[in-house]
Amino acid sequence: MNFDLSAPGHRGRLSMLAAAWVVARRDFTAILFSRTFFFFLLGPLFPVIVGLLAGSVGQRVDQSGEAPAIGVVMAEADAKAMVRARDALADRLGGGLPDMHVVKDLTPAEQADPGVVLASRKGAFAGVLSGSPAAPVLTGPGPLIKDWRGDVELIAAEVRDGSLAFWPQVKLAKTSVAAPGDSRSRLRTAQGAQTLLFLLTMMLAGMVLSNLVEEKGNKIIEVLAAAIPMESVFFGKLFAMLGVSLVGIAVWGSVGGAIYLSAGSVVALPEPAVGWPMLVGLGVIYFAMAYLLLGSVFLAIGSLANTVREVQTLSMPVTMMQLMLFFFATYAMTQPGSAVEMLAVVLPFSSPFAMLARAAQEPALWPHVAALGWQVMWVVLLVRGGSMLFRRRAMKSGPQGAGRKWWRRVVSEG
């Protein structure tokens, strides 16, 4: 795309939006097609791979250990009947009953004292069931056998008189009406969405600061500011970094989605009030707003800093403030409709987190339109304020004529 600066309408300078587009396109392509962007994409994948490997190893360790079981030392017929009854009830109840195994080849000492079975079988059984189905005796550690008492009584009743043998089949009829506990259970979805939004924002917004400090060090930012409105530079850099971040999130989301679909068992979150497609869409929009809000502050910080050490010193209070506002938004989501939640919605830096949680809990969509308009206004104000601060502090040296010539060359080459 070429701009003719000699045309009468341009008067030697681009409009603010056109200049912002050129800056955004320049930064976006420079970062996206660089070698460092590939390693940037790989960065978050290493912890995920390590976590998956650790989880796989832990699962194998759990599977290698034997589950606590009850050894049955009754008469052979009674012992087999107890095991059969346990298996039948487990099928109907969907599991949950302790495993039972008939203890074979009992020694005289084991026949006389069930406690000897626990000691002689080297941890094969956590408890021993003796006596008869009419009068069962469960031997083992106090807390464990207390938890198993009801299960053993149920199994023994099944063996004794078969009173549980004939259960009526229950026909399932699903309804679309929300259960009374849905609003409370959706807190998990809201909390998960908030946490993911915060982690992505804090992890990716720092790119704006590092990019600005780098270009400020080699005087590129001053040349840009001398050639075009500073608001265009800030807006262009913000949206370029936002575009790069969205590309990274798309790659990570694709990999995560493939892992999610290939996993045998996954953690299911309750359905959000606005539905999953709308929640995902709002999540992308609120990420963009949170990124632009925090990025505009980082750009202002970059105008005050001359070295990396100064950047770290100045950005730490902002990072801590954002962390506190995230905790505040998390607290506010537990009190929907209260003054605390309204304050979290009004505060610009906590508004994206509070509104995303609201989307998971409330089906109304019009509050999101108002909140997005409010957040866009704050992005514009912060960018204008940061650009004014940069002009006052950074634009004190360097001829503007050189900047204009350099900018004309950049635009004509674009």
Image (cartoon, rainbow, N blue to C red):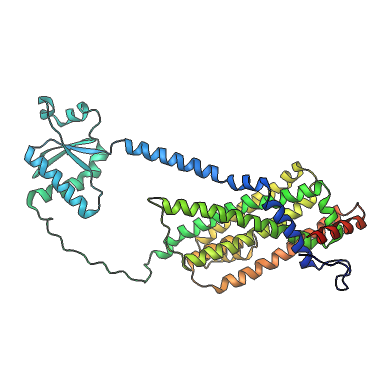
Looking at the rendered structure, the number of numbered marks drawn on it comes to 0
User: Left or right: where does residue 40 sit relative to residue 226?
Assistant: left
User: Left or right: where does residue 308 sit relative to residue 365?
Assistant: right
- Give the position of the C terminus as an image quadrant: bottom right
258 relative to 8, above or below: above
Say whether residue 153 is visible.
no
Residue that appears at 72% across and 50% down: 209
Say whether residue 154 is visible.
yes
- Residue 316 image offset from top left, x and y in percent: 69, 46
Q: Nearer the viewer, residue 23 or 200?
A: 23
- Residue 306 image offset from top left, x and y in percent: 80, 45
The image quarter in which residue 5 lies: bottom right
The image quarter in which residue 233 lies: bottom right
User: Left or right: where does residue 60 sit relative to residue 70?
Assistant: right
265 relative to 182, above or below: above
Residue that appears at 72% across and 48% down: 210
Residue that appears at 61% across and 57% down: 246
- Residue 91 image offset from top left, x and y in percent: 21, 52
